[in-house]
Amino acid sequence: MARLRLRYSEVRRRFTLTAGVHVSALGSPHVTAEFVVDTGTGRSALSHATAADLGVDIGRLRTVPTGGVTAIEERPVLPGVTLRLVGEDVVRVPLDYVLVLTDLRRKGKAGRGGAPVRRAAALSAPSLFGLDALARLRGRLDIDMAKEEGWIAWG
Amino acid sequence: MTEQTAVPEGLVEQLRRFDANARWANLHEWGLQRYKGRFVAVDGEELIGVADSEADLRMRFPGRPALYVAFVSPPELDWIL
């Protein structure tokens, strides 16, 4: 069984991984991106910036209703995306489609984030590695919060 | 789905270098707090740039496929997805 060690951020309190992203229909280059591992996400997603790096014309993508934490919104979908993960070996994860997330917007007055966050003019939404990708990989997710370590295993 | 031969040339090395840059940023995330609210660029496992926008850094360092750019989040800011 091959494994990939996740990264853990103490500040953001999240696990992330690195993946290569490719859309064969576009003939685009492989783009390297960071993904947040999100077990609450049933459909993986690319940040707007990563989609743009792939050469995607986001305005021409069809949209689907997507439930988020606080709203249901129409979001663009990108079909035929392949992720590649590098652990103890290289694994290809073909996905029927992913969502494309727009950049983050601030709502309301500055709260605890305060001035430092106000300075961030354009903050990209993260790319998300969801349970659909883990299922396609037929993978297993192990998280040990006592050690702040996480792994994805497959094969 | 596991591949041994069909991986595009150079991709594995690119992914490993990007991952090493991201791990460096994680390892130094408390030290990088001096730049909180800004964006940092890491390549070659060292800090190479700081700016107020990700776009600025990507324009400043073109042609680096393993470049890792991250927002330095203040620790008091909670994130949910």
Image: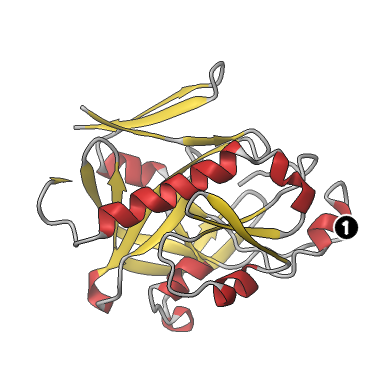
Task: Look at 76% across and 53% down and name the residue there.
Answer: B35
**In the drawing, does residue B22 fall left or right of residue B6?**
right
The amino acid beneath tag 1 is: Ala
Question: x%, y% of residue A131?
Answer: 39, 41
User: Which residue is farthest left?
Assistant: B5
Task: Look at 82% across and 62% down and name the residue there.
Answer: A118
Helix or strand or loop: what does disc 1 sit on?
A: helix
Task: Look at 40% across and 78% down and name the residue there.
Answer: A56
Q: Nearer the viewer, residue A34 or A140?
A: A34
Question: Does the rendering let one see residue B5?
Answer: yes
Q: Quadrant of residue A8?
A: top right
Question: Does the rendering let one see residue A95?
Answer: no
Chain that bears disc 1: A
Determine whether B60 is above or below A3 in the image: below
Question: x%, y% of residue A30?
Answer: 31, 66
Q: Residues within 10 Å of mark 1 (few under 14, many from 20)?
A: few
Per the image, the residue denoted by label 1 is A115
**In the drawing, does residue A33 fall left or right of residue A66?**
left
Determine whether B67 is above or below B19 in the image: below
